[in-house]
Image (cartoon, rainbow, N blue to C red):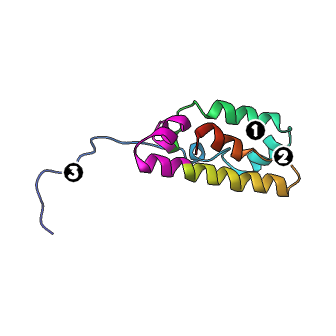
């Protein structure tokens, strides 16, 4: 194998905690939170709208939803679908799920 030039060197590195890219990190955490009543997930959802989210490349959900970059819109849509799935799991277990329709209204999507 031939060399192309100088030795390889890492110039930047990013570490991402996969749990940060999920709604609550795990279904078990979601169910535990849902078991406290609907106020906890709804309060979290309201705060989440204006917090930088690693899965959105550091954008807030509002910023991603309003972005001209279609990949940002795709990322927020993917998270909302994950939220819908996890809300369905919570409801199937007899807990109140998060109101994802309300998030969609807030984000105008």
Q: Quadrant of the N terminus?
A: bottom left
Residue 77 — which label? none
* Dot placed on the residue nearer the N-terminal end, 1 or 2: 1
> Which residue of the protein is positioned furthest toward the right in this rendering?
94
- Which residues are drawn in magenta? 56-76
Residue drawn at (49%, 35%), measured in percent from left and top? Answer: 63
Q: Mark 3 Cα within 10 Å, few/some/many (few <14, many 20+)?
A: few
Please say if the residues under marks 1 and 2 sit with CB atoms less than 8 Å apart.
Answer: yes
Q: Is residue 64 magenta?
A: yes
Query: Residue 75 lies in magenta, yes or no?
Result: yes
Name the residue carrying label 3: 8
Q: Is residue 47 visible?
A: yes
Which residue is labeled 1 in the image?
Answer: 41
**Mark 2 or 3, closer to the camera:** 2
Q: Earlier in the sequence, mark 3 or mark 1?
A: 3
Q: CA distance from mark 2 to mark 3?
A: 52 Å
Residue nearest the viewer, comparing 81 with 35:
81
């Amino acid at each position: 194998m031939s060399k192309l030039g100088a030795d390889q060197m890492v110039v930047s590195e990013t570490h991402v905690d996969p749990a940060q890219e999920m709604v609550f990190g795990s279904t078990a955490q979601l169910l535990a939170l849902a078991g406290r009543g609907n106020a906890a997930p709804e309060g979290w959802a309201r705060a989440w709208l204006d917090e930088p989210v690693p899965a959105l490349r550091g954008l807030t959900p509002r910023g991603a939803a309003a972005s001209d970059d279609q990949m940002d819109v795709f990322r927020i849509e993917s998270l909302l679908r994950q939220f819908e799935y996890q809300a369905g799991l919570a409801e199937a277990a007899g807990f109140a799920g998060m109101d994802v329709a309300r998030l969609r209204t807030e984000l105008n999507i």
